[in-house]
Image (cartoon, grey):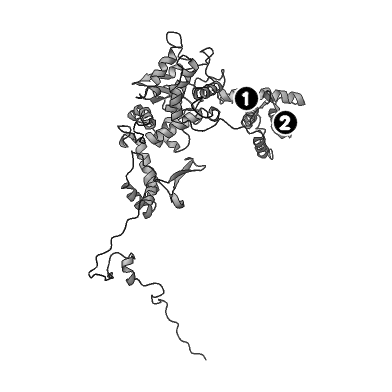
Amino acid sequence: MAARFSASSVSSITAARQHWERVYEKWGWQNEIETGDPHRGAKLVCFVLALMAYEREPNVFYPSSTIGNYVWALCAYMQQLLHADPRTNVVGWRFFMASVVVMCYVPYEPRRRVPTAAIRSALAAVDVTRFDMVQMAVYVLFLYFTFQRSEFPSPKTYDGLDFAKHLLVKHMEPHEGGFRWAVGSTKADPRAERLSADAGAGREWIIVGEVDDPLFDIRVWLQHFYSFFPEGPRDPDSPFFVCTADLKRPLIYRNALADFRQFLTGHIDDPSTVGLHGIRSEGFVVCSNAVGEEAAVMQGGWRGLVSASRYDRLTHAVQMSMAKDMVAWCNPSPDGAAPSGPSGSSGSVGNLGIVAKRAAAKISRSSGGSSRSRNAATTAASVPTSGPKAALPPGWRRVWHATPGKRGGYASFVGPNGRHARSIAHAQALAAPPAVPARPASRTAGAVPRVQASSSSSRITVGNLVDHVTEFDRPPTRRAPAARPFP
């Protein structure tokens, strides 16, 4: 029962027990909440109220997410002692916890995207004599090209370093002009069940290839980064990103967030409005436009948005060229023109392998339901697009509809005048100008052509309206009523 918890869960259980100890000692209860205790609901309420009133620092209270986590941890501890979950059959418990969320809600880290232009400006202004800024440059580029969550390079506490989850020195190595990083268990895959294990048990390599822009070249920043350490190899089992004070302990999340906002100071209006997740979001959007959406999903290991794609693997050529395509897509051209789509092997739809097949299958499924959608897909095939990824017509936008299924939702496309489309091809077909039907040549000038009854086309056009019999002019098909003599 105890071995099923991760290191983070064990830490939560330990903290919850400390709070619970103060509560049961105050009220003279026993440590355990036994199965069927008639006062179990009241005891949990007292525990929650104590957490709501607890001040970590003066005027700094626990948010609702932490309170809910400690309630779960206390109930998990009771189950470890072979008792039933104290929340079982407590009437109104969900309603009570919902009210706690309302009263104790604290906004999470901002999820706004960090523009690539701001990252470029901050990289250009880094003082290479400051270790915190040089390390943050490597940190930002790592998140930007791998789309990993900040929990991978940074644990929450100094004692919370998990060798199965966090980034260590041995989990990064040069690879064909670039680098590769061995990712471990994540929030989306806590037991590393979907990883290929090509970097060892519970680890998988993610490749960041060589780029042409020196500001986004991790090799340049790693040279500055390693210059702050003593000569010789680093301990392979030590954290890769370290505390700026001693260069030994891991760089924990709150310090990384503070360094990141200092890194962006002067390059964004209000650094406090962005967080580390904004780097991941920006990298995903850039890669989706420069390479492809499904390639970005597989690189970052997202849980939603075609979850099955996580089982697929990118080809080596796509992995090596992905970072270069991303930088090229964002780098402004000298003439001010908009960046074009990727070129070369990674931009070829055929080289994406399973990614291209899955994308083609989705378009085929969405356009095969009716003859109208099949005609839309055929028409869209003749609409020119820029790059290998089809673009929405001007004025159209993509709308994501979240659903509780495995796919996480579905996308639709909304255009001017409220028009809706099921796919980009369908949107292009609806936006295309309607084809003008050719008028049949008349035998006599000014004469209206007549359509023969044996014509293979029964479609009514302006030219053959004279031959059209309306519903009111058509003779009735119902039999006339028979006359009956009255007696």
- Taking the image as shown, residue 244 lies to the left or right of residue 386, namely right
- Left/right placement of residue 232 relative to residue 151 reads left
Q: Quadrant of residue 476?
A: bottom left
- Residue 262 at what x, y percent from top left? 52, 22
User: Which label sits in the foreground, 1 or 2?
Assistant: 2
Q: In the image, is residue 209 above or below residue 420? A: above
Q: Earlier in the sequence, mark 1 or mark 2?
A: 1
The x, y position of residue 279, in whole percent, is 47, 29
70 and 106: which is toward the camera: 106
User: Which residue is nearer to you in this view: 94 or 280?
Assistant: 280
- Dot 1 falls on a residue whose secondary structure is helix
Residue 455, compared with residue 410, is above or below; it is below
Label 1 environment density (alpha carbons within 10 Å; few <14, some 14–19, many ≥20) = many
In the picture, residue 39 is in which quadrant?
top right
For mark 2, what is the residue? 46
Residue 349, compared with residue 443, is above or below; it is: above
Residue 202 shows in the view: no
- Front-most of residues 3 and 70: 70
Residues tagged 1 and 2 counted as in contact (Cβ below 8 A): no
Q: Secondary structure at mark 2?
A: helix
Q: Which residue, given by chain and number where applicable, does mark 1 sit on?
A: 13
What amino acid is found at the position of numbered circle 1 in the picture?
A: Ile
- In the displayed image of the protein, which residue is found farthest to the bottom? 487
Kindly report the distance in space between the C-alpha atoms of the residues bearing marks 1 and 2. 18 Å
Q: Residue at point 28% right, 65% down?
A: 456
Q: Amino acid at mark 2?
A: Cys
Choose between 343 and 373: the one closer to the eye: 343
Could you say where residue 172 lies in the image, as x and y percent from the top left? 42, 19
Which quarter of the rendered picture does the N terminus lie within? top right
| Residue 217, horizontal then vertical, whole percent | 38, 22
